[in-house]
Image: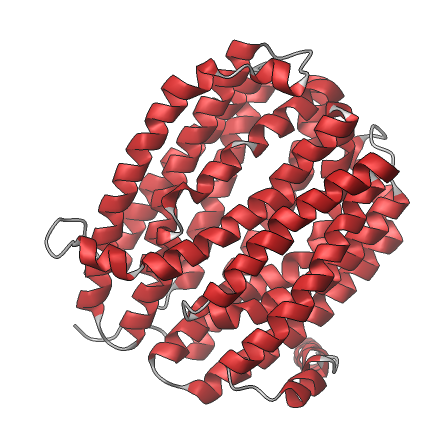
Amino acid sequence: MPDRRPSLIRRLTLGLGAQAYSQATILFVRLAEVPLLLSLWGVQLYGEWLMLAAIPAWLAAGDGGFADATARQMTIRAGAGDRAGALTLFRSTFLLLLAVSAGLVVLAFAGAPLLPLDRWFGFTVMSGPVAATVVGLLILHVVAGFQSSLLYGGFMAEGRYGQGIALMTTIQLLEFGGLAIAVLAGGGPVAAAGGWLAGRLAGLVMMRLVLRRTAPWLRYGLAGATWAEVRALTAPAFASLAFPLGNAFNTQALRLVVGALLGPAAVAVFVPIRILTRLAMQPRAVLGSLMQAEMAMAHGAADYDLFRRLFRRSSQFSLWGGLAVAVAIALTARPVLDLWTGGAIILDWPLTAALLLAAVLNSLWYAALMVAYATNRHGPVAIVYLLVYGLGATLLAWLAVGATGLAGAGWALLAAEAIMLMWVLPVTWRMSDERPLAWLRQVLTPPWIVLAWAGKAFTRRRP
Protein backbone atom coordinates (compact mmCIF):
# COMPACT_ATOMS: atom_id res chain seq x y z
CA MET A 1 0.00 0.00 0.00
CA PRO A 2 1.51 3.40 -0.95
CA ASP A 3 2.56 5.90 1.72
CA ARG A 4 -0.25 8.47 2.00
CA ARG A 5 1.33 10.50 4.78
CA PRO A 6 1.65 14.26 4.18
CA SER A 7 5.04 15.99 4.17
CA LEU A 8 6.77 17.18 7.36
CA ILE A 9 5.86 20.85 6.77
CA ARG A 10 2.26 20.00 6.00
CA ARG A 11 2.04 17.71 9.05
CA LEU A 12 3.37 20.46 11.31
CA THR A 13 1.11 23.09 9.76
CA LEU A 14 -1.98 20.93 10.16
CA GLY A 15 -0.84 19.93 13.64
CA LEU A 16 -0.43 23.55 14.71
CA GLY A 17 -3.88 24.36 13.38
CA ALA A 18 -5.36 21.43 15.28
CA GLN A 19 -3.52 22.49 18.42
CA ALA A 20 -4.83 26.03 18.10
CA TYR A 21 -8.32 24.53 18.00
CA SER A 22 -7.46 22.27 20.93
CA GLN A 23 -6.07 25.01 23.14
CA ALA A 24 -8.95 27.35 22.34
CA THR A 25 -11.36 24.57 23.30
CA ILE A 26 -9.52 23.75 26.51
CA LEU A 27 -9.52 27.43 27.44
CA PHE A 28 -13.22 27.76 26.67
CA VAL A 29 -14.21 24.64 28.64
CA ARG A 30 -12.10 25.52 31.66
CA LEU A 31 -13.28 29.11 31.74
CA ALA A 32 -16.92 28.22 31.14
CA GLU A 33 -17.16 25.33 33.60
CA VAL A 34 -16.21 27.31 36.69
CA PRO A 35 -18.86 30.10 36.50
CA LEU A 36 -21.47 27.64 35.20
CA LEU A 37 -21.19 25.25 38.13
CA LEU A 38 -20.46 27.92 40.72
CA SER A 39 -23.53 29.96 39.80
CA LEU A 40 -25.95 27.02 39.62
CA TRP A 41 -24.58 24.78 42.38
CA GLY A 42 -22.76 27.08 44.79
CA VAL A 43 -19.27 26.82 46.25
CA GLN A 44 -19.92 23.79 48.50
CA LEU A 45 -21.51 21.50 45.89
CA TYR A 46 -18.98 22.60 43.26
CA GLY A 47 -16.15 21.69 45.63
CA GLU A 48 -17.75 18.29 46.30
CA TRP A 49 -18.03 17.67 42.53
CA LEU A 50 -14.35 18.53 42.05
CA MET A 51 -13.32 16.07 44.74
CA LEU A 52 -15.39 13.26 43.20
CA ALA A 53 -14.12 14.05 39.71
CA ALA A 54 -10.58 13.55 41.02
CA ILE A 55 -11.19 9.88 41.88
CA PRO A 56 -11.69 8.36 38.38
CA ALA A 57 -8.50 10.08 37.20
CA TRP A 58 -6.61 7.35 39.05
CA LEU A 59 -8.44 4.72 37.04
CA ALA A 60 -7.43 6.39 33.78
CA ALA A 61 -4.15 4.59 34.39
CA GLY A 62 -6.06 1.29 34.41
CA ASP A 63 -5.02 0.53 30.83
CA GLY A 64 -1.53 -0.10 32.19
CA GLY A 65 -0.08 2.50 29.87
CA PHE A 66 -0.66 0.22 26.87
CA ALA A 67 -2.77 2.65 24.82
CA ASP A 68 -0.04 5.31 24.81
CA ALA A 69 2.81 2.84 24.34
CA THR A 70 0.94 1.18 21.47
CA ALA A 71 0.30 4.52 19.74
CA ARG A 72 4.01 5.38 19.79
CA GLN A 73 5.15 1.92 18.71
CA MET A 74 2.58 1.89 15.88
CA THR A 75 4.00 5.22 14.71
CA ILE A 76 7.58 3.93 14.86
CA ARG A 77 6.64 0.82 12.85
CA ALA A 78 4.63 2.79 10.31
CA GLY A 79 7.55 5.23 9.99
CA ALA A 80 9.72 2.24 9.05
CA GLY A 81 7.09 1.06 6.51
CA ASP A 82 5.75 -1.80 8.66
CA ARG A 83 1.99 -1.24 8.60
CA ALA A 84 1.30 -4.93 9.10
CA GLY A 85 3.18 -4.79 12.39
CA ALA A 86 1.31 -1.65 13.38
CA LEU A 87 -2.02 -3.40 12.70
CA THR A 88 -0.98 -6.39 14.82
CA LEU A 89 -0.18 -4.05 17.71
CA PHE A 90 -3.52 -2.29 17.34
CA ARG A 91 -5.53 -5.51 17.47
CA SER A 92 -3.55 -7.02 20.32
CA THR A 93 -3.93 -3.94 22.51
CA PHE A 94 -7.62 -3.63 21.68
CA LEU A 95 -8.27 -7.07 23.16
CA LEU A 96 -6.29 -6.21 26.27
CA LEU A 97 -8.25 -2.99 26.77
CA LEU A 98 -11.54 -4.85 26.45
CA ALA A 99 -10.54 -7.13 29.33
CA VAL A 100 -9.45 -4.20 31.50
CA SER A 101 -12.64 -2.30 30.67
CA ALA A 102 -14.81 -5.23 31.75
CA GLY A 103 -13.15 -5.19 35.16
CA LEU A 104 -13.66 -1.45 35.57
CA VAL A 105 -17.33 -1.70 34.58
CA VAL A 106 -17.85 -4.26 37.36
CA LEU A 107 -16.07 -1.87 39.73
CA ALA A 108 -18.31 1.01 38.66
CA PHE A 109 -21.57 -0.80 39.38
CA ALA A 110 -20.59 -3.14 42.22
CA GLY A 111 -17.78 -1.41 44.09
CA ALA A 112 -18.68 2.28 44.10
CA PRO A 113 -22.01 1.89 45.98
CA LEU A 114 -20.18 0.22 48.87
CA LEU A 115 -17.98 3.26 49.58
CA PRO A 116 -19.20 5.87 52.13
CA LEU A 117 -17.76 8.71 50.06
CA ASP A 118 -19.93 11.39 51.66
CA ARG A 119 -18.58 10.56 55.14
CA TRP A 120 -14.98 10.18 53.99
CA PHE A 121 -14.89 13.63 52.38
CA GLY A 122 -17.19 15.48 54.75
CA PHE A 123 -19.87 16.23 52.16
CA THR A 124 -22.85 18.27 53.32
CA VAL A 125 -24.85 18.44 50.07
CA MET A 126 -24.35 15.15 48.21
CA SER A 127 -25.56 11.96 49.82
CA GLY A 128 -23.67 8.66 49.71
CA PRO A 129 -25.83 7.05 46.97
CA VAL A 130 -25.61 10.14 44.79
CA ALA A 131 -21.81 10.28 45.17
CA ALA A 132 -21.52 6.57 44.31
CA THR A 133 -23.64 7.02 41.17
CA VAL A 134 -21.51 9.96 40.05
CA VAL A 135 -18.30 7.98 40.53
CA GLY A 136 -19.75 5.01 38.62
CA LEU A 137 -20.65 7.17 35.62
CA LEU A 138 -17.23 8.81 35.67
CA ILE A 139 -15.57 5.37 35.65
CA LEU A 140 -17.53 4.51 32.50
CA HIS A 141 -16.24 7.79 31.06
CA VAL A 142 -12.69 6.58 31.72
CA VAL A 143 -13.37 3.23 30.01
CA ALA A 144 -14.55 4.99 26.85
CA GLY A 145 -11.38 7.07 26.98
CA PHE A 146 -9.22 3.94 26.61
CA GLN A 147 -10.63 3.35 23.14
CA SER A 148 -10.30 6.95 21.97
CA SER A 149 -6.61 6.91 23.03
CA LEU A 150 -6.06 3.75 20.99
CA LEU A 151 -7.82 5.22 17.95
CA TYR A 152 -5.60 8.30 18.19
CA GLY A 153 -2.64 5.96 17.67
CA GLY A 154 -4.03 5.19 14.22
CA PHE A 155 -3.92 8.85 13.25
CA MET A 156 -0.36 9.15 14.61
CA ALA A 157 0.77 6.13 12.61
CA GLU A 158 -0.71 7.61 9.44
CA GLY A 159 1.10 10.92 10.00
CA ARG A 160 -2.24 12.64 10.53
CA TYR A 161 -1.94 13.43 14.21
CA GLY A 162 -3.37 16.89 13.51
CA GLN A 163 -6.63 15.27 12.45
CA GLY A 164 -6.51 13.04 15.52
CA ILE A 165 -5.96 16.02 17.82
CA ALA A 166 -8.88 17.85 16.21
CA LEU A 167 -11.18 14.87 16.75
CA MET A 168 -10.06 14.40 20.37
CA THR A 169 -10.77 18.10 20.88
CA THR A 170 -14.23 17.77 19.37
CA ILE A 171 -14.90 14.97 21.86
CA GLN A 172 -14.05 17.41 24.66
CA LEU A 173 -16.59 19.86 23.26
CA LEU A 174 -19.25 17.15 23.05
CA GLU A 175 -18.52 16.12 26.65
CA PHE A 176 -18.80 19.65 27.95
CA GLY A 177 -21.93 20.21 25.86
CA GLY A 178 -23.56 17.18 27.46
CA LEU A 179 -22.61 18.37 30.94
CA ALA A 180 -23.73 21.95 30.31
CA ILE A 181 -27.11 20.91 28.90
CA ALA A 182 -27.74 18.68 31.90
CA VAL A 183 -26.82 21.38 34.42
CA LEU A 184 -28.68 24.21 32.65
CA ALA A 185 -31.76 21.98 32.60
CA GLY A 186 -31.62 21.91 36.41
CA GLY A 187 -29.71 18.65 36.82
CA GLY A 188 -27.34 17.89 39.65
CA PRO A 189 -24.05 15.97 39.71
CA VAL A 190 -25.60 12.69 38.47
CA ALA A 191 -27.10 14.37 35.42
CA ALA A 192 -23.84 16.24 34.80
CA ALA A 193 -21.80 13.01 34.89
CA GLY A 194 -24.33 11.34 32.58
CA GLY A 195 -24.14 14.18 30.07
CA TRP A 196 -20.35 14.10 30.17
CA LEU A 197 -20.35 10.35 29.45
CA ALA A 198 -22.89 10.68 26.61
CA GLY A 199 -20.70 13.29 24.90
CA ARG A 200 -17.64 11.03 25.03
CA LEU A 201 -19.53 8.04 23.62
CA ALA A 202 -20.87 10.11 20.72
CA GLY A 203 -17.37 11.40 20.02
CA LEU A 204 -15.89 7.91 20.12
CA VAL A 205 -18.28 6.74 17.38
CA MET A 206 -17.42 9.80 15.28
CA MET A 207 -13.67 9.21 15.70
CA ARG A 208 -13.90 5.58 14.57
CA LEU A 209 -15.91 6.50 11.45
CA VAL A 210 -13.31 9.08 10.43
CA LEU A 211 -10.40 6.69 11.04
CA ARG A 212 -12.01 4.11 8.73
CA ARG A 213 -11.61 6.60 5.89
CA THR A 214 -8.22 7.95 6.96
CA ALA A 215 -6.51 4.59 7.58
CA PRO A 216 -8.58 1.87 5.88
CA TRP A 217 -5.82 -0.65 6.61
CA LEU A 218 -6.40 -0.25 10.37
CA ARG A 219 -9.32 -2.62 10.99
CA TYR A 220 -10.63 -4.36 14.07
CA GLY A 221 -10.32 -8.13 14.15
CA LEU A 222 -8.65 -11.10 15.81
CA ALA A 223 -6.25 -12.08 13.02
CA GLY A 224 -2.67 -11.48 14.12
CA ALA A 225 -3.58 -10.41 17.67
CA THR A 226 -1.23 -12.11 20.13
CA TRP A 227 -0.31 -11.81 23.76
CA ALA A 228 3.33 -11.87 22.63
CA GLU A 229 2.86 -8.37 21.19
CA VAL A 230 1.33 -7.23 24.45
CA ARG A 231 4.16 -8.75 26.48
CA ALA A 232 6.75 -7.04 24.25
CA LEU A 233 5.16 -3.70 25.15
CA THR A 234 5.03 -4.43 28.87
CA ALA A 235 8.17 -2.49 29.84
CA PRO A 236 7.39 0.73 27.91
CA ALA A 237 3.69 0.42 28.78
CA PHE A 238 4.30 0.12 32.51
CA ALA A 239 6.77 2.98 32.24
CA SER A 240 4.03 4.97 30.49
CA LEU A 241 1.73 4.10 33.38
CA ALA A 242 3.93 6.15 35.70
CA PHE A 243 2.98 9.32 33.83
CA PRO A 244 -0.83 9.27 34.26
CA LEU A 245 -0.30 8.09 37.84
CA GLY A 246 2.13 10.93 38.44
CA ASN A 247 -0.35 13.36 36.88
CA ALA A 248 -3.15 11.97 39.03
CA PHE A 249 -1.14 12.61 42.18
CA ASN A 250 0.03 16.04 40.99
CA THR A 251 -3.41 17.29 40.01
CA GLN A 252 -6.21 15.21 41.47
CA ALA A 253 -4.54 14.20 44.73
CA LEU A 254 -3.68 17.84 45.37
CA ARG A 255 -7.41 18.59 45.32
CA LEU A 256 -8.02 15.86 47.87
CA VAL A 257 -5.17 17.12 50.08
CA VAL A 258 -6.55 20.65 50.05
CA GLY A 259 -10.07 19.38 50.65
CA ALA A 260 -9.02 17.07 53.49
CA LEU A 261 -7.03 19.77 55.31
CA LEU A 262 -8.98 22.93 54.47
CA GLY A 263 -12.44 21.73 53.31
CA PRO A 264 -14.30 21.56 49.95
CA ALA A 265 -14.68 25.36 49.82
CA ALA A 266 -10.88 25.72 49.71
CA VAL A 267 -10.81 23.31 46.76
CA ALA A 268 -13.20 25.65 44.95
CA VAL A 269 -10.58 28.41 45.43
CA PHE A 270 -7.50 26.32 44.62
CA VAL A 271 -8.77 24.76 41.38
CA PRO A 272 -9.68 27.98 39.48
CA ILE A 273 -6.34 29.58 40.39
CA ARG A 274 -4.48 26.49 39.27
CA ILE A 275 -6.47 26.35 36.03
CA LEU A 276 -5.56 29.98 35.38
CA THR A 277 -1.82 29.55 36.05
CA ARG A 278 -1.59 26.29 34.10
CA LEU A 279 -2.40 28.26 30.95
CA ALA A 280 1.33 29.03 30.97
CA MET A 281 1.88 25.31 30.19
CA GLN A 282 -0.19 25.44 27.02
CA PRO A 283 2.73 26.23 24.65
CA ARG A 284 4.54 23.07 25.77
CA ALA A 285 1.29 21.10 25.51
CA VAL A 286 0.92 22.23 21.90
CA LEU A 287 4.50 21.34 21.02
CA GLY A 288 4.51 18.11 23.02
CA SER A 289 1.67 16.58 21.01
CA LEU A 290 3.33 17.55 17.72
CA MET A 291 6.85 16.56 18.67
CA GLN A 292 5.89 13.19 20.13
CA ALA A 293 4.59 12.07 16.74
CA GLU A 294 7.34 13.71 14.65
CA MET A 295 10.14 12.42 16.86
CA ALA A 296 8.67 8.92 16.75
CA MET A 297 8.60 9.03 12.94
CA ALA A 298 12.14 10.46 12.75
CA HIS A 299 13.35 7.75 15.12
CA GLY A 300 11.64 5.04 13.08
CA ALA A 301 13.28 6.39 9.91
CA ALA A 302 16.71 6.67 11.66
CA ASP A 303 16.87 10.43 10.87
CA TYR A 304 18.72 11.45 14.04
CA ASP A 305 19.76 14.91 12.80
CA LEU A 306 16.08 15.81 12.37
CA PHE A 307 15.36 14.26 15.76
CA ARG A 308 17.84 16.58 17.51
CA ARG A 309 16.63 19.66 15.60
CA LEU A 310 13.09 18.93 16.71
CA PHE A 311 14.33 18.53 20.29
CA ARG A 312 16.09 21.91 20.33
CA ARG A 313 13.35 23.90 18.64
CA SER A 314 10.53 22.42 20.71
CA SER A 315 12.42 23.17 23.94
CA GLN A 316 13.14 26.74 22.84
CA PHE A 317 9.57 27.53 21.81
CA SER A 318 8.14 25.82 24.88
CA LEU A 319 10.28 27.80 27.34
CA TRP A 320 9.75 31.22 25.80
CA GLY A 321 6.10 30.63 25.07
CA GLY A 322 5.48 29.55 28.65
CA LEU A 323 7.37 32.54 30.01
CA ALA A 324 5.39 35.00 27.86
CA VAL A 325 2.05 33.53 28.97
CA ALA A 326 3.15 33.50 32.64
CA VAL A 327 4.00 37.20 32.52
CA ALA A 328 0.64 38.00 30.89
CA ILE A 329 -1.21 36.04 33.58
CA ALA A 330 0.72 37.75 36.38
CA LEU A 331 -0.32 41.16 35.02
CA THR A 332 -4.01 40.31 34.59
CA ALA A 333 -4.76 37.61 37.17
CA ARG A 334 -6.82 39.69 39.60
CA PRO A 335 -9.30 41.29 37.15
CA VAL A 336 -9.55 38.05 35.15
CA LEU A 337 -10.39 36.00 38.24
CA ASP A 338 -12.92 38.58 39.43
CA LEU A 339 -14.65 38.62 36.04
CA TRP A 340 -14.44 34.85 35.60
CA THR A 341 -15.91 33.86 38.96
CA GLY A 342 -18.15 36.87 39.49
CA GLY A 343 -16.08 37.85 42.53
CA ALA A 344 -16.78 34.53 44.29
CA ILE A 345 -13.07 33.59 44.34
CA ILE A 346 -10.45 35.88 45.90
CA LEU A 347 -6.97 35.79 44.32
CA ASP A 348 -4.29 34.28 46.58
CA TRP A 349 -1.08 35.98 45.40
CA PRO A 350 1.47 33.69 47.14
CA LEU A 351 -0.27 30.65 45.64
CA THR A 352 -0.50 32.29 42.21
CA ALA A 353 3.19 33.30 42.15
CA ALA A 354 4.39 29.84 43.12
CA LEU A 355 2.18 28.17 40.51
CA LEU A 356 3.35 30.52 37.74
CA LEU A 357 7.02 29.84 38.52
CA ALA A 358 6.26 26.11 38.55
CA ALA A 359 4.60 26.39 35.13
CA VAL A 360 7.67 28.04 33.58
CA LEU A 361 10.01 25.32 34.89
CA ASN A 362 7.59 22.66 33.66
CA SER A 363 7.62 24.17 30.17
CA LEU A 364 11.33 23.45 29.83
CA TRP A 365 11.74 19.96 31.23
CA TYR A 366 8.48 18.59 29.87
CA ALA A 367 9.49 19.52 26.32
CA ALA A 368 12.75 17.61 26.84
CA LEU A 369 10.80 14.62 28.12
CA MET A 370 9.47 14.03 24.59
CA VAL A 371 12.91 12.65 23.62
CA ALA A 372 12.37 9.64 25.87
CA TYR A 373 8.61 9.43 25.51
CA ALA A 374 8.43 9.47 21.71
CA THR A 375 10.92 6.61 21.39
CA ASN A 376 9.47 4.39 24.14
CA ARG A 377 12.72 4.73 26.14
CA HIS A 378 11.16 6.59 29.03
CA GLY A 379 11.75 3.96 31.72
CA PRO A 380 14.65 5.85 33.40
CA VAL A 381 12.49 8.96 33.74
CA ALA A 382 9.17 7.30 34.54
CA ILE A 383 9.94 6.19 38.08
CA VAL A 384 11.31 9.63 38.98
CA TYR A 385 8.22 11.22 37.45
CA LEU A 386 5.95 9.14 39.67
CA LEU A 387 8.03 9.49 42.85
CA VAL A 388 8.91 13.20 42.55
CA TYR A 389 6.28 14.86 40.35
CA GLY A 390 3.49 12.69 41.73
CA LEU A 391 4.02 11.21 45.19
CA GLY A 392 6.66 13.74 46.25
CA ALA A 393 4.55 16.76 45.31
CA THR A 394 1.55 15.28 47.14
CA LEU A 395 3.52 14.57 50.32
CA LEU A 396 5.16 18.00 50.27
CA ALA A 397 1.76 19.60 49.75
CA TRP A 398 0.29 17.71 52.72
CA LEU A 399 3.08 19.02 54.94
CA ALA A 400 3.10 22.54 53.50
CA VAL A 401 -0.66 23.08 53.43
CA GLY A 402 -0.94 21.87 56.99
CA ALA A 403 1.75 24.31 58.07
CA THR A 404 1.17 27.39 55.88
CA GLY A 405 -2.29 27.11 54.36
CA LEU A 406 -3.36 27.13 50.72
CA ALA A 407 -0.16 28.73 49.38
CA GLY A 408 1.78 25.71 50.65
CA ALA A 409 0.36 23.63 47.79
CA GLY A 410 1.95 26.03 45.30
CA TRP A 411 5.39 25.93 46.93
CA ALA A 412 5.27 22.12 47.05
CA LEU A 413 4.54 21.99 43.32
CA LEU A 414 7.36 24.45 42.59
CA ALA A 415 9.85 22.28 44.49
CA ALA A 416 8.78 19.20 42.52
CA GLU A 417 9.20 21.03 39.20
CA ALA A 418 12.74 22.15 40.12
CA ILE A 419 13.80 18.58 40.95
CA MET A 420 12.31 17.24 37.71
CA LEU A 421 14.18 19.87 35.70
CA MET A 422 17.53 18.83 37.19
CA TRP A 423 16.82 15.15 36.51
CA VAL A 424 15.19 15.14 33.06
CA LEU A 425 17.57 17.40 31.13
CA PRO A 426 20.79 15.34 31.61
CA VAL A 427 18.93 12.08 30.86
CA THR A 428 17.44 13.35 27.60
CA TRP A 429 20.73 14.94 26.52
CA ARG A 430 22.38 11.53 26.75
CA MET A 431 19.53 9.77 24.97
CA SER A 432 19.69 12.13 21.99
CA ASP A 433 23.51 12.44 21.87
CA GLU A 434 22.93 16.15 22.36
CA ARG A 435 25.68 18.60 23.35
CA PRO A 436 24.36 20.35 26.47
CA LEU A 437 26.03 23.73 25.83
CA ALA A 438 24.83 23.86 22.22
CA TRP A 439 21.33 22.92 23.37
CA LEU A 440 21.36 25.57 26.09
CA ARG A 441 22.62 28.30 23.74
CA GLN A 442 19.72 27.75 21.36
CA VAL A 443 17.04 27.16 23.97
CA LEU A 444 17.95 30.22 26.05
CA THR A 445 17.96 32.44 22.95
CA PRO A 446 14.56 34.03 22.31
CA PRO A 447 12.95 32.59 19.14
CA TRP A 448 13.30 35.72 17.05
CA ILE A 449 12.28 33.69 14.03
CA VAL A 450 8.68 33.97 15.23
CA LEU A 451 8.86 37.76 15.12
CA ALA A 452 10.46 37.59 11.68
CA TRP A 453 7.65 35.39 10.38
CA ALA A 454 5.05 37.70 11.91
CA GLY A 455 6.74 40.73 10.32
CA LYS A 456 6.79 39.11 6.90
CA ALA A 457 3.15 38.08 7.21
CA PHE A 458 2.18 41.63 8.21
CA THR A 459 4.16 43.11 5.30
CA ARG A 460 2.51 40.78 2.80
CA ARG A 461 -0.95 41.82 4.00
CA ARG A 462 -0.27 45.57 3.65
CA PRO A 463 -1.71 47.14 0.49
Instruction: Establish if 62 lies above or below 40.
Output: below
Colouring style: secondary structure
Residue 443 sits above or below residue 15 on the image: below
Q: Can residue 405 be seen in this view?
A: no
204 left or right of 26?
A: left
Extreme-left residue of the structure:
223
Asked if residue 121 lies left or right of residue 97, the reply is right
Residue at the spot 34% in from the left edge and 44% down from the top edge: 147
Instruction: Determine if residue 130 is in view.
Output: yes
Residue 122's x, y, as percent?
68, 16
Query: Which quarter of the image is occupied by the C terminus?
Result: bottom right
In terms of image quadrants, where is residue 38? Answer: top right
> In this image, 138 relative to 444: left or right?
left
**Could you say where residue 440 lies in the image, as x and y percent from the top left?**
69, 83
Q: In which quadrant will I find the N terminus?
A: bottom left
Q: Is residue 82 above or below residue 326?
A: below
Front residue of 360 and 457: 360
Q: Which residue is drawn at 76% across and 24% down?
A: 263
- Count the marks: 0
* Front in this rendered view, residue 462 or 314: 314
Residue lying at 27% horizontally and 62% vertically, measured from the top left? 232
Q: Residue 409, how many percent across, how many down?
A: 77, 43
**Residue 296 spot, x, y in % from top left:** 40, 72
Instruction: Give the residue displayed 80% in from the left and 42% down from the top.
Output: 400
Q: Is residue 313 left or right of residue 349?
A: left
Residue 328: image quadrant is bottom right
